Image (cartoon, rainbow, N blue to C red):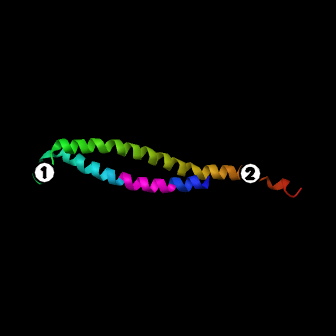
């Protein structure tokens, strides 16, 4: 059970980096869509159709990574409680050990 916690912790860290990257790209493309005059003036080689397509495509991956990150985060949150509960139920009470 500890292995699943450690694996989920590693996966969660990787997902944090991925979601930061995707989120940053989505923020930039979202700002370009919000302020198209800025995008047209300083980035004339990009058109709004490509920016919109990129933003729309990234949103699917962002959602998938976010759901996976939530699942690993929930496991890391509840794992200590599960471990504490299992350790209490596996040890006998003190008054019965010395008879």
* Magenta segment, prevailing SS (helix, strand or loop): helix
- As measured in the structure, the alpha-carbon distance from the residue carrying label 2 to the one carrying label 1 is 66 Å
Frontmost residue, 65 versus 36:
65
Q: Is residue 61 left or right of residue 89?
A: left
Picture coordinates of residue 66 (x, y %)? 41, 46
Residue at the image position 20 percent from the left and 44 percent from the top? 50
Residue at the image position 45 percent from the left and 48 percent from the top? 69
Frontmost residue, 89 versus 6:
6
Picture coordinates of residue 99 (x, y %)? 89, 55
Residue at the image position 53 percent from the left and 55 percent from the top? 7
- Considering every residue shown, the one lying at the far right of the view is 99
Label 1: which residue?
45
**Label 1: how many Cα within 10 Å (few below 14, some 14–19, many 20+):** few
Picture coordinates of residue 18 (x, y %)? 38, 53
Residue span colored magenta: 9-19
User: Can residue 11 be found in the magenta stretch?
Assistant: yes
Residue at the image position 28 percent from the left and 51 percent from the top? 25
Frontmost residue, 54 versus 40:
54
Comes first in the chain, label 2 or label 1: 1
**Label 2: how many Cα within 10 Å (few below 14, some 14–19, many 20+):** few
Q: Secondary structure at mark 1?
A: loop
Residue 64's tag is: none
Whether pointer 2 and pointer 1 mark residues with C-beta atoms closer than 8 Å, the reply is no
Q: Is residue 60 left or right of residue 79?
A: left
Q: Is residue 9 left or right of residue 40?
A: right
Residue 60 vertical placement versus 94 (above, below): above
User: Can residue 14 be found in the magenta stretch?
Assistant: yes
Q: Secondary structure at mark 2?
A: helix
Residue 90's tag is: 2
Residue 17 vertical placement versus 35 (above, below): below
């Amino acid at each position: 059970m500890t292995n699943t916690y450690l694996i989920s912790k590693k996966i969660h860290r990787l997902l944090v980096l991925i979601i930061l990257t995707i989120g940053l790209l989505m923020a930039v493309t979202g700002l370009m869509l919000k302020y198209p005059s800025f995008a047209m003036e300083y980035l004339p080689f990009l058109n709004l159709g490509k920016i919109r397509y990129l933003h729309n495509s990234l949103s699917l991956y962002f959602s998938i990574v976010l759901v996976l990150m939530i699942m690993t985060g929930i496991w890391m949150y509840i794992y200590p409680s599960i471990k504490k509960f299992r350790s209490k139920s596996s040890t006998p009470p003190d008054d019965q050990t010395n008879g």
